Image (spheres, rainbow, N blue to C red):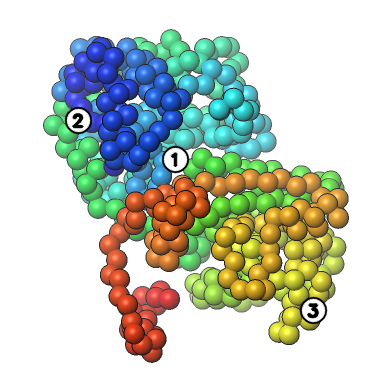
Amino acid sequence: MIIYEATKEEFMNHVTEDSIAMKIHQAFVEKIGGTSKSEINSWNNSMNYMYKVLNTTQIPDDISVAIEYKVPANSRRIDFIISGLDENGQYSIVIIELKQWDKLDLVEDEDGMVRTFIGKRLVKTAHPSYQAWSYAKLISEYNESVQNDQISLRPCAYLHNYMHTENDPLTNNLYNNYITKAPVFTKGDVLKLRGFIHLYIKKSDQKKSLYLIEHGKIRPSKSLQDALMKMLDGNEEFIMIDEQKVVYETALSMAKKAQNGGKKQVLIVEGGPGTGKSVLGINLLVQLTAKELVCQYVTKNSAPREVYTKKLQKNYKKSYINNLFKGSGVFYEALKNEFDVLIVDEAHRLNEKSGLFKNKGENQMKEIIYASKFSVFFIDEYQKISMHDIGNKEQIKHYAMLFDAEVVEMELESQFRCNGSDGYLAWLDDVIGIRETANYDGFDFEYDFKIFDDPNELRNQIFEKNKINNKAI
C-alpha cells in the first residue's frame, strides 16, 4: 500500500505550496486512519529536505515518488521511495529511511544496535542502515514482482538533522556491514544523496515499477518448520526488524552475561499474534546452540515439537533433536543451572504442577528459572487456553527475584501480519480494541470460510486438506 504517489515534479510543487504534509495526511486518513501531530511535523520537516535533494535537472521531473509505503505482510512503512529506470533500462527503486535524530550512541556488544532519543526517551534501536536494508529485504522476500520483473532495490538512510563529526558513532566500523548495504547520509550530504539517487535512477519508467510493487503478488510468509533445517545448517532465513532485532540482540547479550559467572538472567518478552515470538525463539535457539551453549526450546504444547522433530529427523539424529526441544514439565528434577539457556514459547501456558496427574514438581516457572543460567519467556497473557494455564509476568518476576536474577522486560509490537487462526485473533484484538495489530484491516491472502453443522464433517474436511501438504489443523 502506497499512501502518497506522484511524479517528482508534482512532489516538488506540493512542497513549494506547503501542502505536502496535508496531502500525505489526507491520504493516510483515507487508507489507514488517524496519525499523530508529531508525524505530521516530521513529514513537513523531512519533505523539505527531500525537496533540496531532488532539486536538480540530473534527476528527471517525470520519475516517480512514493511516500509511506507499507511493507507486504507487515505493519511497517518505508518513508520515501524514488523509482525509475537505471542506465541499462531496468526497473530501479531507491529506498530512503528518513530520521529526525540529531545524535546517537554506540552499542558495542550488540550487532547493528544504537541508542538515541525517540519520543523524549533514550532507547536502544536498530542502526538506520540496518533498518533500510531490512525493509528492502522484506520487500524482495514477499513481493514476487521484485524478482520476476527484475526490480533492483537500493536502500539508504538520510539523517538530515544529524551533524556528522570525526570518529562519529553513526559510521563506526561496528556498522560497516550494514552501511555497505545501505549507505547513510547526514546533514550537509544533499549532494552526496543526490548523486546516489542519480547513480540508479536515470529516467522515468512511467510508474511501472511502483505499480508492480503495489499490485504484485504477495508470497505467503515462510513456514518456520520448513525453514528450521536450513537455519540449523547456518542459513539466514528470517530478517528481523525493529523491536524484533532489539529483543534478539538483547537476548544474545544477556546469554553472554549469564555465562560469565554473574547473576542469573531472565528475559520476559510480551507480544500478541503476529509479533514474531516463535521466529525469535527459534533464531535464538539456533544461534546460541551454534555458540556451543546448552540451549533448549521449551513448549507446553507438544504439536510444534512434533512438527520440528518430523522436519529434522531425516538430517539429524533423534538424540540431537530431543535435546533441542522439550516439554515444560520435565524440569522439576533438574539441577541448579543445569542448562545455559531455556527458551520458553507460549509461557502463558505454563502449569503449576507437572506430570500426567499434575502431582509433580512445584511450579514450572520456578523450575525453569532454577534450572537455567538464562531463561527467556515469550508470553501473551490474553492467549491462555485452559484453567491449568497460569503463566504470567508477575509470577515469573517473583521467582526471578527469589533466585536473585536480573530481569529485563520487553514488548513486541505487532509488526507482521499473520494468517489462519492467529490472523483472525490478531484482527479480532484490533477490532475490539484490546491492542493494535498489523491485521487491523483483515488478511493479506484469500480464505474460504465454511460453517459446519456436524463436527464429524469438519474433521473429514481437515483430513482431506491434509492430503495436500499435511498442514491443515
Instruction: From the top left corner, tell me how far across and down residue 339 is, in percent.
Output: 77, 62
Look at the numbered disc 2 and give the secondary structure of its residue: strand
Seen from this angle, which residue lies furthest bottom? 456
Look at the numbered disc 3 and give the secondary structure of its residue: loop
- Residue sitting nearer the eye, 153 or 372: 372
Q: Quadrant of the N terminus?
A: top left
| Residue at screen point 41% across, 21% down | 41
Q: Which residue is mark 1?
A: 134
| Residue at screen point 56% across, 63% down | 383
Disc 3 versus disc 1: distance between alpha carbons?
46 Å
Q: Which residue is mark 3?
A: 360
Q: Quadrant of the C terminus?
A: bottom left
- Residue sitting nearer the eye, 169 or 444: 444
| Residue at screen point 47% across, 51% down | 433
Characterize the local packing of mark 2: few (<14), some (14-19) or many (20 or more) Cα atoms within 10 angstroms: many
Look at the numbered disc 1 and give the secondary structure of its residue: helix
Q: Of marks 1 and 2, which one's residue comes earlier in the chain? A: 2
Characterize the local packing of mark 3: few (<14), some (14-19) or many (20 or more) Cα atoms within 10 angstroms: some
The amino acid sitting under disc 1 is Ser
Q: Which mark is residue 85?
A: 2
Q: Of marks 3 and 1, which one's residue comes earlier in the chain? A: 1
Instruction: From the top left corner, tell me how far across and down residue 387 is, in percent.
Output: 65, 73
In this view, 404 is above or below 220: above
Disc 1 versus disc 2: distance between alpha carbons?
23 Å
Contact flag, marks 3 and 1 (Cβ < 8 Å): no
The answer to whether residue 122 shows anywhere in this view is yes
Characterize the local packing of mark 1: few (<14), some (14-19) or many (20 or more) Cα atoms within 10 angstroms: many
The amino acid sitting under disc 3 is Lys
Left or right: 125, with 442 as reference point: right
Disc 2 versus disc 3: distance between alpha carbons?
67 Å
Quarter occupied by residue 456? bottom left
Quarter occupied by residue 278? bottom right
